[in-house]
Image (cartoon, rainbow, N blue to C red):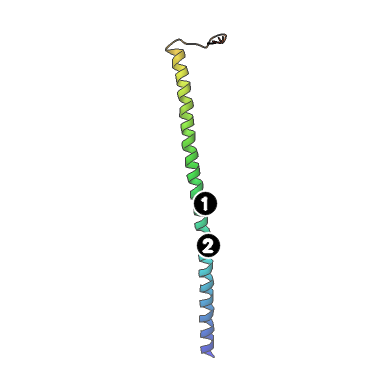
Amino acid sequence: MRRGWGTAVIATLIATTAIAVAVSKHRSRALLDAQQELSWERDRLKTEWAQLQLEEAALAAHGQVERVARERLDMQEPDEFVAVEVTP
């Protein structure tokens, strides 16, 4: 009788361990998928951030040109705009 109980306990432990391994593998795969998706999102956000920095630099450069034109060169926008059409 004792031998039967020992075998049953060992079989139960083996089955429990097998289930735990399967659950662990499933969780590991799910976490790996999530990590991959987050890596793609990170790369996309890095690219977007770089584009925004370039855009900000371009806008700042335009503003700086306008500021220098006003302050250093005493330039200003004309009061009225006149277009002249030239025909050959």
> Which residue does the numbered mark 1 point to in the structure image?
37
> Which residue does the numbered mark 2 point to in the structure image?
27
Question: Dot 2, crowdedness within 10 Å: few (<14), some or many (≥20)?
Answer: few
Residue displayed at 49% across by 57% down: 32
Pick the front one: 18 or 54: 54
Q: Is residue 19 above or below residue 36?
A: below
Q: Is residue 19 above or below residue 2?
A: above
Residue displayed at 50% across by 44% down: 44
Image position, residue 56 (x, y; %):
48, 29
Q: Is residue 65 above or below residue 75?
A: below
Question: Dot 1, crowdedness within 10 Å: few (<14), some or many (≥20)?
Answer: few
Report the mark closest to the observer, 2 or 1.
Answer: 1
Residue type indicated by callout 2: Arg
Q: Secondary structure at mark 1?
A: helix
Pick the front one: 82 or 47: 82
Which badge, 2 or 1, comes first in the chain's sequence? 2
Separation (CA) of disc 2 from disc 1: 15 Å
Image position, residue 82 (x, y; %):
56, 9
Q: Which residue is most to the front? A: 88
